[in-house]
Amino acid sequence: MNRWMVFIVCALAVALVALIGSRAQADGMARKVYRQAHCVVPARLWMSQTRWSCRRDQKCCYDYALRKGTCVAASDRCI
């Protein structure tokens, strides 16, 4: 009996989260539109997290040897 009660409570919780999540996205409120792409390289053992910004029409590239982030055109490749 306990398994059924746990299953029902979990199902209701998932349904409630899905209902609230969809309402938050479709409520018609104006959201901030970012004009820049925010680039983030996650932290590694010997490096801290790195962040930089590129224009929307550019792509984020990070060079691990130089430890430097760059922005290139969307059609270019990161080297």
Image: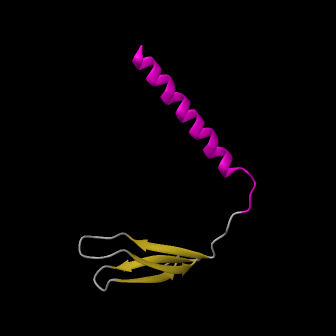
Is 3 magenta? The answer is yes
12 w.r.t. 30: above or below: above
26 w.r.t. 10: above or below: below
Return the x and y of residue 13 as percentages of the image width and height. 53, 33
26 w.r.t. 77: above or below: above
Is 13 magenta? The answer is yes
Tell me how many marks there are. 0
**26 left or right of 52?**
right
**70 left or right of 63?**
right
- Of residues 50 and 65, which is closer to you in this image? 50
Residue at (55% x, 29% y) in the render: 12
**57 left or right of 7?**
right
Give the residues in magenta: 1-30
Return the x and y of residue 22 as percentages of the image width and height. 64, 45
- Of residues 79 and 6, which is closer to you in this image? 6
Residue 77 visible in the shown view? no
Return the x and y of residue 49 as percentages of the image width and height. 36, 74
Q: Residue furthest top?
A: 1
**25 left or right of 51?**
right
Q: State which quadrant residue 42 falls in.
A: bottom left
Quadrant location of the C terminus in the rendered image: bottom left
Q: How is the image coloured?
A: secondary structure
38 w.r.t. 20: above or below: below
- Of residues 48 and 61, which is closer to you in this image? 48
Residue at (63% x, 76% y) in the render: 35
Q: Residue furthest left?
A: 46
The majority secondary structure of the magenta stretch comes to helix
